[in-house]
Amino acid sequence: DTGVSQDPRHKITKRGQNVTFRCDPISEHNRLYWYRQTLGQGPEFLTYFQNEAQLEKSRLLSDRFSAERPKGSFSTLEIQRTEQGDSAMYLCASSTPDRPGDTEAFFGQGTRLTVV
Amino acid sequence: KQEVTQIPAALSVPEGENLVLNCSFTDSAIYNLQWFRQDPGKGLTSLLLIQSSQREQTSGRLNASLDKSSGRSTLYIAASQPGDSATYLCALTTGGFKTIFGAGTRLFVKA
């Protein structure tokens, strides 16, 4: 499978616990993005990496959220002290550099987080 | 601030009907526009990508157009099938390669 891979697909956690999600982008893609999607809404941008550098973070990414991309390959998104409002689908996408107009984002299947 | 609006929010049509989904945006300074399909509880599948310099793209029964001057894009689906039932999302890539999404149109095609 050469697409974007996310793990786990589903996660149920108790409020206050920490969770970590993983994303493996398409191998030749150097840009990686995290989005959050709540029911009935489109995905909202969280953060973006170019190689290992985190270049942009949304105001949605509170201090309880942290994302890393060591060595510019896979990425992890950690949520500390989870709250019920964190329940959502977390989507990862990757793209190639090229020219901006050619940038086509490829998405993974997402991680569905439920905080109880 | 770029805002993306999709109309209608939901649509139900009989099988075989041709249909048009609409997407409007407020800032014409975009790099490209993508249409995605999302099945319930699943990730996004890219359908069509229109570069900023292009007017339309076609793939099979799908045709997407882009008019930057009016801030509009349409996705045309010909001869709709029950398997086309899904949520269709319009997304713009802006400076910084960030993608901004609309809320989507939920399509139901009745057999």
Image: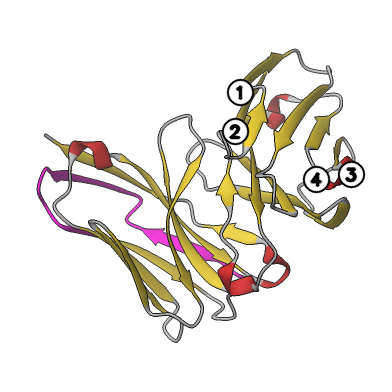
**Label 3 or label 1, whichever comes before in sequence order:** 1
- Residue depicted at 67% across the width and 22% down the height: A8
Alpha carbon distance from label 2 to label 1: 6 Å
Report the residue marked by disc 3.
A71
Q: Is residue B4 magenta?
A: yes
- Residue depicted at 61% across the width and 60% down the height: B99
**Label 3 or label 2, whichever comes before in sequence order:** 3
User: What is the magenta range?
Assistant: B1-20
Amino acid on which the number 2 mark rests in the picture: Gly
- Give the foreground label among 3 and 4: 3
Report the residue marked by disc 4.
A61
- Residue A64, relative to residue B74: is it above or below? above
Q: Is residue A61 magenta?
A: no
Amino acid on which the number 3 mark rests in the picture: Lys
Report the residue marked by disc 1.
A9
- Residue depicted at 71% across the width and 36% down the height: A24
Q: Position of residue B89 (x, y in %)?
A: 44, 52
Alpha carbon distance from label 3 to label 1: 24 Å
Q: Are marks 3 and 1 on the same chain?
A: yes
Q: Are marks 2 and 1 on the same chain?
A: yes
Amino acid on which the number 1 mark rests in the picture: Arg
**Label 1 or label 4, whichever comes before in sequence order:** 1
Subunit of mark 4? Answer: A
Q: Position of residue A4 (x, y in %)?
A: 61, 39
Report the residue marked by disc 2.
A110
Instruction: Determine crowd level at label 1: few under 14, some 14-19, many 20+ residues with C-alpha closer than 10 A.
Output: some
Q: Are marks 3 and 2 on the same chain?
A: yes
Amino acid on which the number 4 mark rests in the picture: Leu
- Give the foreground label among 3 and 1: 3
